[in-house]
Image (cartoon, rainbow, N blue to C red):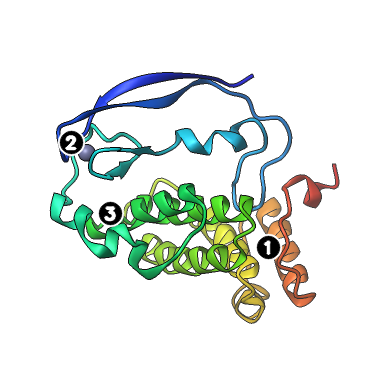
Amino acid sequence: MTMIFRENKICFVCKKESSHPVIASTHAFGSPDLDTRPPEGQRSTMHCWLQICPHCGYAASDISKETPVTKAFIESRIYQECDGNLFFDPLAQNFFRQFLLAKKGENDKTAFFALLHAAWACDDNQETYGAIRCRRLAVAQLEKWLALPDRDVDDETLLLIKADLLRRSYDFVTVVSEFETMTMKNEFHQKMIDFQVALAKKEDAGRYTIDQITGR
Ligand SMILES: [Zn+2]
């Protein structure tokens, strides 16, 4: 069962106080998606993953924490209008704003996850074009992250996510050309990549879970 409480935070940018939902406990029942999206109930807690200051619009996982981004950037049209990307879903909008902040602050990992989460929010709101746009930008961000010398996630895991992002944004040609002959050290990772390539060859951009590979 998911338990949520509220907590007051002082925004680092405007120094004003506001109340935000915080997850006290949750559960995950079932299998995650191939792009690591968790099953229910964690799946339905995305509205708690990001805090939005109602006074200035600063979006972060914790708005009380320091950011190198200025108030002027948060007030800019680029930030307020999601750099010309129109989303109907406010959650997708706010994850995209978190991406813009992370990109400005040169935090490639946070920028990548913000885009992935924006794509999930678009999926839930049937915003196909927005989901494709976020996934394509996420691929570019993932490549930047892969180029960093210090990473806390191994290359194979990131490449598996990249394959899913490409396929779910209808770039089947790149999935096949980049991954068909790629060899993974981990046996299960190899199964996952073979699964992705087979789906891409069928031009299938659908959502699949890990269980669908293991046949459980
Ligand atoms: Zn604020």
What amino acid type should be assigned to the residue bearing mark 3? Leu
The CA distance from mark 3 to mark 2 is 14 Å
Considering every residue shown, the one lying at the far right of the view is: 215
Q: Are marks 1 and 2 in contact (CB under 8 Å)?
A: no
- Report which residue position mark 3 lands on: 101
The CA distance from mark 1 to mark 2 is 42 Å
Q: Is residue 89 above or below residue 136?
A: above
Instruction: Give x and y (percent) for residue 178.
Output: 59, 76
- Report which residue position mark 2 lands on: 12
| Ligand 1 within 8 angstroms of badge 2 C-beta | yes
Instruction: Give x and y (percent) for residue 126.
Output: 64, 57
Instruction: Give x and y (percent) for residue 129.
Output: 57, 69
What amino acid type should be assigned to the residue bearing mark 1? Ile
The CA distance from mark 3 to mark 1 is 32 Å
- Report the number of discs: 3
Residue drawn 59% across and 32% down? Answer: 42
Residue density around tag 3, few if under 14, some if 14–19, many if 20 or more, within 10 Å: many
- Report which residue position mark 1 lands on: 193
Q: Is residue 204 above or below residue 4?
A: below
Q: Quadrant of the C terminus?
A: top right
